[in-house]
Image (tube, coloured by chain):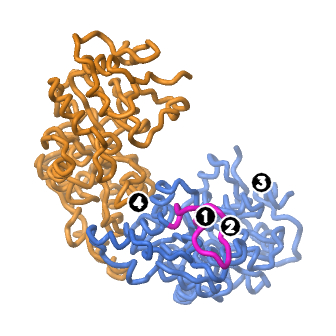
Chain colours: A blue, B orange
Amino acid sequence: MASPRKLSTPQDYADLLSRYDTWLFDCDGVIWSGDEVIDGASKAVDFLRGHGKRVIFVTNNAARSRPMLKKKFDRLGIAATEDEILSSAYAAAVYLKNVLKFPADRKVFVMGMEGIEAELDTVGIQRCGGTHPEDNKFLPANDYSSLVEEDAIDPAVGAVLCGFDMHLNYAKLCKAYRYLTREGAQGPVLAGKTGGGCHFILTNDDKVVPAMGQLWPGSGSLATPLIDSTKREPIVVGKPHAPMLETVKSLYNIDESRSIFVGDNLHTDILFAQDGKMDSLLVLTGVTKEEDCETEAIWPSFIMDNISNIVAAETGPSRIGAVGVDGTIGIHASL
Amino acid sequence: MASPRKLSTPQDYADLLSRYDTWLFDCDGVIWSGDEVIDGASKAVDFLRGHGKRVIFVTNNAARSRPMLKKKFDRLGIAATEDEILSSAYAAAVYLKNVLKFPADRKVFVMGMEGIEAELDTVGIQRCGGTHPEDNKFLPANDYSSLVEEDAIDPAVGAVLCGFDMHLNYAKLCKAYRYLTREGAQGPVLAGKTGGGCHFILTNDDKVVPAMGQLWPGSGSLATPLIDSTKREPIVVGKPHAPMLETVKSLYNIDESRSIFVGDNLHTDILFAQDGKMDSLLVLTGVTKEEDCETEAIWPSFIMDNISNIVAAETGPSRIGAVGVDGTIGIHASL
């Protein structure tokens, strides 16, 4: 298998620039790396905006709300409005509201942190669990009898939403298990009713998450006790899964043929774009190396060392198709 | 596929009685059901003892120590000594000691409760984690920096042992993750050294556990965040896995050809016996129904409605082979 097209000349960059109106960006490994901005990323974003491009940031982060994420953009000097930031926490809330039409009189049981709660509040979905003090304390084994009581669970709950939760505990898992396995739990979630159907939603299935200079078990690992015990498969919202793209479409009026997804991870970002039939640009500032592309069935439309290179684009008259060093054009771009 | 041999006459029972010297019993669904003794089980155990049979109770219970389990036997009127009770908690401790030769100067990080700790103490293995107050409190997200410190983990740890833990929390998962992924973690665990190899042991992989009249996520579900995030496969000690039988052999001097495993669960008990090339008796007082045997590739040597039926055995001269109603003899028995 040949390597994908590596872009490396001002002409390549100019062709890329002219071809796409909407630039969707993954963050970690593209814009920043942990708490450090990636060199030149800020200028690249400004450059795209200067050429009239629309910029949207799509992250699997499920711990923070968009206002919290916005502060990180500000701190790292990346221009972004809250509306341009789509996290898996916000996407999960929007997906419940816009795609699943979650009834206004039902509640979501949250196995996650403040960020998820804030986004549910934003879209006007009721919630319980989450950071509630009752669910965030050390519960001695001999106090578990309280969990067995009928009133330990809220019959208005019609979804369990799992994300990253540093306060995960066994009692939360038991409550979520009860919601997901009650009678009729796999049926429809109806307005004006209680009990019955209960959606099972997972913000993202990243198995590990970088935190404080280490890796820790991530959202995708924390939900597995529920997947294993309930034998139910959750709807996973985050990249590389389809609900994130459905959410992008429900929020932003984009022309997919004139949009490109920029990411550093073959298995989340590039697969996400590939499954969504959107062109993609792999940058080599994160987890995927150029040689990884030779052995995988996931195929970026283009490769570039660093998103900062885009500022070297020749700004002559735009042409059709972004031409790679080997003279071929991007696979989706050529369709 | 024909049904396995159902035993139903006094002659059947007498043949079974004469064929086996050691009777290994699963508990839940055979001897008791939750907190209720199964009708006639006590008499059946006494009857076997009265005929000079050796009786061993093999349970996947990972929450209780043998003295704690012995109290349950006493309360339900089932005669048993502590030595006759093998739980997955005790089996894990014995497996570490006898099979893995765990060094006396290394420690086990416990993700489990008092029962596991007591059994490690019994065999003289050092431990940390478990019920330690530091690991069993509500840790606010902004206090997690303490977990990142070098002294948050104990370099003497050479194994992570996971069982049922009603006090499971995210901080414990993070600690276990660090032990299991440190440099050389998949290498040997050496005496007189620190760091390096770290065994990954799971008491049992039951996905749910009956508790207080409900089902809750079980040991096998609680370990999945670590399996998913570390990409390591644990050694699972409990039925149906081989380490439980290796532990039985390392503790009891049994003649396998004259031993039978009695259980109610095709997927744990009967598979355990089948994989261990031991004859098995399925009783119908628990989870498996007779018709389940027609569709599964797991094959009990014999089926009986209730272990209590054994007391109806004719006690004439013993004969060779236990003959089923259709005239066939048990598959392993016939080898």
- Mark on residue A243? 2
Q: Is residue B119 at all visible to an observer of this figure? A: no
Residue at which label 3 appears: A326
- Of badges 4 and 1, the one in the foreground is 4
Q: Which mark is residue A236?
A: 1
**Pointers 3 and 4 in contact (C-beta within 8 Å):** no
Residue B214 is labelled as: 4
**Front of the two marks 1 and 3:** 1
Mark 2 touches mark 3? (CB < 8 Å)? no
Q: Nearer the viewer, residue B296 or A70?
A: B296
Marks 2 and 3, how far apart at CA: 35 Å
**Marks 1 and 3: same chain?**
yes
* Measured Cα–Cα span from mark 2 to mark 1: 7 Å
Which circle, 3 or 4, is nearer the viewer?
Answer: 4
Residue A245 visible: yes
**Gap between marks 1 and 3, in whole Å?**
38 Å
Element assignment for label 2: helix
Kind of residue indicated by mark 4: Gln
Asked whether disc 2 touches disc 1, contact meaning CB atoms under 8 Å apart, the reply is yes
What residue do we see at 19% from left, 42% from top? B78
Magenta residues, start to end = A179-200
Cα gap from disc 4 to disc 1, whole angstroms: 28 Å
Q: CA distance from mark 3 to mark 4?
A: 63 Å
Q: Chain of mark 2?
A: A
Residue B81: x and y in percent read: 12, 41
